[in-house]
Image (cartoon, rainbow, N blue to C red):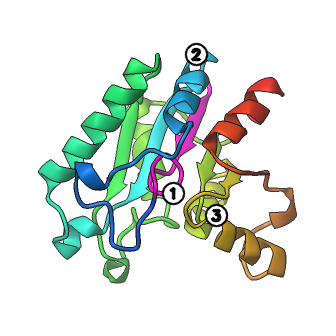
Amino acid sequence: MPLLILDRDGVINQDSDNYIRCLDDWQPVPGSIEAIARFCRAGYTVAIATNQSGLSRGYFTLDDLETIHGELCRQVEEAGGSISGIFYCPHLPTEGCACRKPATGLLEAMEAELEVAVADSFFIGDSLKDLQAAQAMHCRPVLVLTGKGRATQAQLQTGTANLTAPESIPVYADLAAAADAMLSA
């Protein structure tokens, strides 16, 4: 089955400059849960790669994060899909870890744990870091305009994105629109 990689905040759920700290803060983007289930029914293995520096900042605990991820998985399962893995980086941007996107450690961990190559997989994100990580691992980057997507699109259009062929990256309004286009192709 083909692998589909998703960022979390800004793609699956609403993003916040104040971080998603607890289950009450976690609000799915309209249509995103159903879109994930549609990808699953179409034969995709769905995994999530997400930076979660709020852990290191002390904004939330591992239990809080697991509660959010449990609810995400529950809603996707209720809609008829499944999440094969959620891979997260807990580190601060200044820590220089190998897992914080745009570094590729999360994708490498995904390959090892799921025993699947990420190369040629679609990676749907809203930030430049998502697109850079995707290209570094030879994934097929896709941009959604939810979350930080509009600001990222502006970077692509002005040529400040430091990406290969940014004009060839598909752009969709949200995850549901991406599912519509990708599953009908």
Q: CA distance from mark 3 to mark 2?
A: 26 Å
Tag 3 secondary structure:
helix
Left or right: 9 with respect to 2?
left
Q: What's the residue at 30%, 69% (across, down)?
A: 53
Which residue is tagged 2? 41
Residue 7 is a magenta residue: yes
Q: Amino acid at mark 2?
A: Arg
Amino acid type, mark 3: Gly
Secondary-structure class at tag 1: loop
Q: Earlier in the sequence, mark 3 or mark 1?
A: 1
C-beta proximity under 8 Å, tags 3 and 1 = yes
**Kind of residue at disc 1:** Gly
The circle on residue 59 is none
Question: Which residue is located at x 62 percent, y 48 percent?
Answer: 124
Query: Magenta residues?
Result: 1-14
- Of circles 3 and 2, the one toward us is 3
- The disc placed on residue 149 is 3
Give the class, few, some or many, for how many residues have Cα within 10 Å of label 3's Cα (few <14, many ≥20).
many
Q: Relative to 128, does residue 120 appear above or below in the rendering?
A: above
Q: Residues within 10 Å of mark 1 (few under 14, many from 20)?
A: many
Q: Nearer the viewer, mark 1 or mark 2?
A: 1
- Crowding around mark 2 (Cα neighbors within 10 Å: few <14, some 14 to 19, many 20+) is few
Distance of label 3 from label 1 (alpha carbons): 8 Å
Q: Quadrant of the C terminus?
A: top right
Helix or strand or loop: what does disc 2 sit on? helix
Q: CA distance from mark 1 to mark 2?
A: 23 Å
Residue 130 on image: x %, y %: 57, 60
Please state the horizontal and vertical placement of residue 126, each as a whole percent of the image: 59, 59
Location of the N terminus by quadrant is top right
Which residue is identified by label 1? 10
Residue nearest the observer in this picture, 176 or 118: 176
Q: Which is nearer the N-term, disc 3 or disc 2?
A: 2
